[in-house]
């Protein structure tokens, strides 16, 4: 018996459904609507800039593999012949160059390549951005400490070397060689520069011509740096080479390449997706109530036992061999993005259409009401048509609304169609053929199916209601229905909270890029996510930002750079 209940719809149907006669439903769908949209969001967003900027407090920790021969960049201001460990790599040379080239003194660039696959762990969210009041570092702090935050403990977010050393020490027994994190672009925290996994490609003095002469900055010898001492570089004012003025713009542009396309070269192991959104972590449920995903914190709220259970889960997944698939081999991340690709634009179009037509009706504009209703039918039918078997319920094709006798039990959108729509990608996991699934994949499956169920049932409701409406409705009746559908679509969009809907209003000219505020580059005028500001989703509205050399993007000044050697 397949049944599910929840926010959206109640549906039960017979055990054998027509998706395929070979498939017998053996499981029920345990819909957990409490965290499914968050898990889905995190899954669909891994290694992508915008969603992880918009939802900056990362809740997912996931192992993966860095593919061999990836170029890795490390710029610094001193002339040492090899970096000490740990240090940071950028995937984009513009990031390394952007950090260093506009600072007084010479600039040296190390380029490395990994000569074999490397086991990494990725923290989602703005996990390489530093703040003592935001949740950007929560998941890392919990992994290191294994417990929730004790308010009286001192926390110095700038202490990146300490954090790096702790992470490296933590992951070493599992063969983890580096940690992938994000601020404006992605970086790799690298644990050991003597590792045979990497080889040096080049080490060059790339100081931009015209840089004022300045002695290279010396570092304290490795190991002698007193714990907790940040590595301070000279602050502005300085006079960088005029040729280096574009460095921040270039960095911003490189980060923008990842706006909605994931960082390449990293193959994540979805069967090992560990998330603080797991519904078993009860201590986080209460604090999340009434908050948007942007505001969710972990470290201050989690109980010690929940924190410990996530660390144990992480150790458990790391003991598995990352290079071999452990589940059925489904690429869960791509599946989530296929779903967003199918629905995202359509939802936006339906939303805008309903917005336009309700305002037009309210303003008393002259409209063809039949055509308006037909548009709603078209827009709601289009993502569902694939799942509706019209052979029996829809005997002969009649263009709507030319008189198909629609009953109140609109036959063509029924439990079978809803089932097909909801389980289109995961039905095989409900069949008789057993597939081994990790517990992490079960969380992903529930999340995908819950999101699909909501999409399909909301659209199904709008479709059937619009079919059942009179062909030539009265103005007030139609307005009433349109407002009801609009409210449903708005609620759906809030529940999904996809960053797919964020975009620049215009096409940016070639001397500018479409970006949202990124730490530490153009987050100067404000710091979204600071708790004192409340939830300010509009602060992330993408806009065209000029890359001109005479107006370089501002760098956020309200913080100290700590690790600056990426
Ligand atoms: C789903 O959400 C509704 C409304 O918030 C709630 O009443 C219900 O208990 C939730 N279901 C589960 C399984 O958490
Ligand atoms: C964060 O650091 C700033 C500057 O050091 C300090 O003024 C502020 O009180 C700190 N905030 C928190 C929440 O610790
Ligand atoms: C919190 O930390 C302080 C100082 O380290 C310590 O004295 C106190 O016992 C801790 N409290 C808890 C509940 O662990
Ligand atoms: C909504 O109205 C605006 C302004 O008239 C128009 O540009 C836009 O195309 C309309 N959008 C939809 C989806 O109907
Ligand atoms: C209104 O739209 C319907 C459906 O497209 C069309 O058949 C009808 O002729 C239109 N009516 C007017 C007055 O334009
Ligand atoms: C749904 O409709 C199809 C025909 O379109 C029919 O074969 C099927 O039995 C119906 N399913 C249910 C559960 O009513």
Image (tube, rainbow, N blue to C red):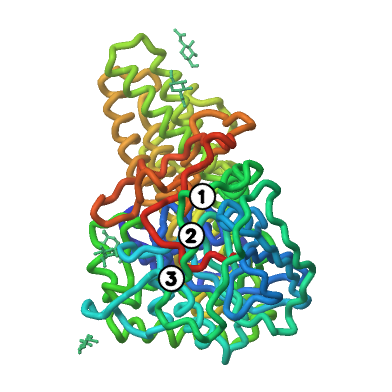
Residue occupying image coordinates x 61% and y 54%? 101
- Residue in the foreground of this view, choosing between 214 and 155: 214
Q: Which residue is mark 3?
A: 28
- Position in image of residue 153 (x %, y %): 26, 80
Q: Are marks 2 and 1 in contact (CB under 8 Å)?
A: yes
The reply, left or right, for residue 247 in relation to residue 359 is right
Secondary structure of residue under mark 3: loop
Mark 2–mark 1 distance (CA, rounded to whole Å): 8 Å
Q: Quadrant of residue 140?
A: bottom left
Q: Which residue is mark 1?
A: 238
Q: Is residue 393 visible?
A: no
Q: Which residue is mark 2?
A: 234
The reply, left or right, for residue 187 in relation to residue 467 is right
- Residue in the foreground of this view, choosing between 477 and 139: 139
Q: Are marks 2 and 3 in contact (CB under 8 Å)?
A: no
Mark 1–mark 3 distance (CA, rounded to whole Å): 65 Å
Q: Quadrant of residue 162?
A: bottom left
Ligand 3's quadrant:
bottom left
- Residue in the foreground of this view, choosing between 70 and 364: 70
**In front: mark 2 or mark 3?**
2
- Residue in the foreground of this view, choosing between 161 and 312: 161
């Amino acid at each position: 018996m397949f049944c599910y209940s929840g926010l959206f719809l109640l549906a039960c149907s017979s055990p054998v459904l027509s998706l395929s006669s070979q498939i017998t439903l053996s499981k029920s769908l345990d819909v957990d609507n409490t965290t499914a949209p968050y898990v889905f969001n995190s899954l669909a967003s891994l290694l992508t800039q915008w969603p992880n900027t918009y939802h900056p407090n990362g809740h997912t920790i996931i192992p993966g593999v860095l593919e061999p021969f990836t170029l890795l960049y490390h710029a610094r201001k001193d002339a040492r012949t090899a970096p000490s460990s740990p240090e940071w790599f950028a995937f984009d040379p513009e990031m390394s160059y952007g950090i260093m080239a506009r600072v007084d003194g010479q600039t040296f660039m190390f380029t490395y390549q990994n000569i074999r696959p490397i086991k990494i762990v990725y923290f989602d969210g703005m996990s390489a951005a530093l703040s003592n009041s935001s949740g950007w570092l929560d998941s890392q702090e919990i992994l290191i400490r294994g417990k929730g935050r004790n308010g009286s403990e001192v926390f110095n977010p700038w202490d990146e070397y300490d954090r790096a050393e702790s992470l490296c020490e933590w992951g070493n027994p599992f063969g983890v060689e580096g940690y992938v994190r994000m601020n404006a672009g992605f970086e790799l925290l690298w644990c050991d520069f003597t590792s045979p996994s990497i080889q040096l490609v080049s080490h060059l003095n790339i100081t931009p011509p015209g840089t004022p002469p300045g002695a290279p900055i010396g570092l304290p010898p490795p190991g002698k740096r007193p714990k907790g001492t940040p590595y301070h570089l000279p602050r502005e004012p300085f006079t960088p080479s005029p040729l280096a003025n574009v460095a921040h713009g270039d960095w911003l542009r490189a980060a923008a390449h990842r706006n909605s396309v994931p960082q390449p070269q990293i193959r994540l192991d979805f069967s090992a997706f560990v998330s603080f959104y797991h519904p078993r972590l009860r201590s986080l449920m209460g604090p999340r109530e009434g908050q948007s995903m942007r505001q969710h914190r972990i470290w201050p709220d989690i109980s010690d036992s929940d924190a410990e259970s996530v660390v144990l889960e992480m150790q458990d997944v790391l003991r598995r061999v990352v290079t071999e698939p452990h589940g059925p081999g489904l690429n869960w991340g791509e599946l989530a993005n296929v779903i967003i690709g199918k629905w995202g634009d359509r939802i936006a179009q339906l939303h805008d259409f309903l917005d336009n037509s309700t305002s037009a009706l309210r303003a008393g504009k002259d409209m063809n009401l039949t055509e308006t209703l037909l548009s709603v039918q078209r827009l709601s039918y289009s993502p569902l048509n694939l799942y509706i078997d019209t052979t029996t319920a829809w005997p002969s094709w009649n263009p709507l609304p030319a008189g198909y006798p629609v009953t109140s039990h609109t036959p063509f959108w029924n439990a079978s169609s809803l089932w097909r729509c909801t389980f289109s990608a995961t039905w095989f996991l409900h069949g008789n053929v057993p597939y081994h699934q990790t517990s992490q994949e079960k969380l992903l499956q529930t999340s995908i199916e819950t999101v699909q169920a909501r999409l399909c049932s909301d659209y199904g409701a709008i479709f059937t209601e619009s079919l059942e409406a009179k062909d030539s409705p009265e103005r007030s009746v139609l307005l009433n229905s349109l407002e009801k559908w609009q409210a449903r679509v708005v609620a759906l969009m809030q529940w999904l909270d996809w960053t797919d809907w964020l975009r620049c209003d215009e096409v940016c000219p070639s001397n500018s890029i479409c970006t949202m505020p990124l730490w530490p580059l153009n987050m100067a005028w404000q710091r979204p996510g600071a708790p004192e500001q409340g939830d300010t989703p509009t602060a992330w509205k993408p806009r065209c930002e000029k890359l001109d050399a005479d107006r370089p993007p501002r760098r956020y000044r309200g913080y100290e750079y700590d690790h600056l050697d990426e």
